[in-house]
Amino acid sequence: MIIVTGATGQLGSQIVERLLDRVPAERVGVSVRDPKKAQSLADRGVRVRRGSFADPAGLAHAFEGASRILIVSVDRMGEETVRQHRTAIDAAVASGARRIVYTAQMGAGPTSRFQACRDHAATEQALAASGVPWTSLRNGFHAASGLHFLAPGLASGEIALPADGPVCWTAHADLAEAAAVILAGEDRFEGPTPPLTAAEALTFADLADLAGVTRTTIPDDEFRARLVDDGTPDALADHLLTIFTAAREGEFATADPTLAELIGREPISMRALLRERLSDE
């Protein structure tokens, strides 16, 4: 039994679909906060159980009988995020899982300028201390995030963002396929994987050129103020700013062939994703 958490989220849902291409539905289980949202999976024979990283007892039931468990990292940052990940790891250990797989990010490390990468590093430390074999998927920076930052500029003709650096923007679809390959296959990776990235690192200036819009660099504090004015909580605005701080230091610039090797083809490029986005405008 392979259990996937967060199976109704943007990444988790795609991982389950790709996993079902490789193993029978009766070997797949999902742990979700709202089972009603996973009814379509239940109808296809997937085991659906309620599970929340804030509820150890619920996770014990959701993880029952698992041989492998994929912990999809929560979409938050900070100490509470790491606590929830530790709860999930503890539940996986208690369930008797023979391997824990975790969705981390390239650049994960205790000294990263990006809070999420520090959270991933702390979670990897907990995995290393768990006593269970583990694999941490060092996923490339999500291309969807880059497109989100671009969206206002595509409408106005001007992309106004802090100074950045090259980023290997990587598609959810490719990362989901790689996760499914690892979950269904042999234990190729022990501990962190190499960066699972697309083949090219691009700056926002590159993306602006491709989109035919102007790239304007604004001070960090102005960017943060704009976020807060738009309703972003102060702490989240601070965290989002550190994406650019880390990118300036090259933390997300490494292109690695491992993702292409895992999925058996070249990853989807940010250029292609941007062209698709522009065609929908």
Image (spheres, helix red, strand yellow):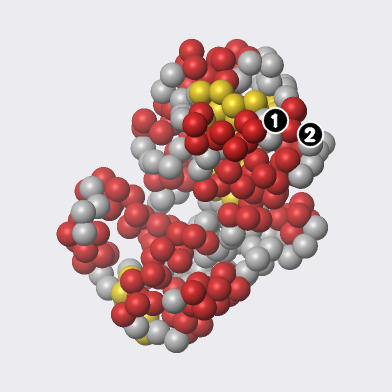
Please, what is the three-letter code of the amino acid marked with disc 1? Gly
The quadrant the N terminus occupies is top right
**Residue drawn at point x = 57 percent, y = 42 percent:** 12
Q: What is the CA distance from the residue labelled 1 to the residue labelled 2?
A: 9 Å
| Residue receiving disc 1 | 45
For the residue pair 13 and 265, the one nearer the viewer reads as: 13
- Give the x, y percent position of residue 69: 64, 28
User: Residue sitting at 36 percent across and 32 percent down?
Assistant: 79
**Looking at the picture, how far across and down is residue 130, in whole percent?**
60, 20
Classify residue 64 as left or right of residue 58: right
Label 2 environment density (alpha carbons within 10 Å; few <14, some 14–19, many ≥20): few
Quadrant of the image containing the C terminus: bottom left
* Side of 4 relative to 24 (left or right): left
Q: Is residue 191 above or below residue 222?
A: above
Q: Which residue is mark 2?
A: 24
| Quadrant assignment, res 164 | bottom left
Amino acid of disc 2: Pro
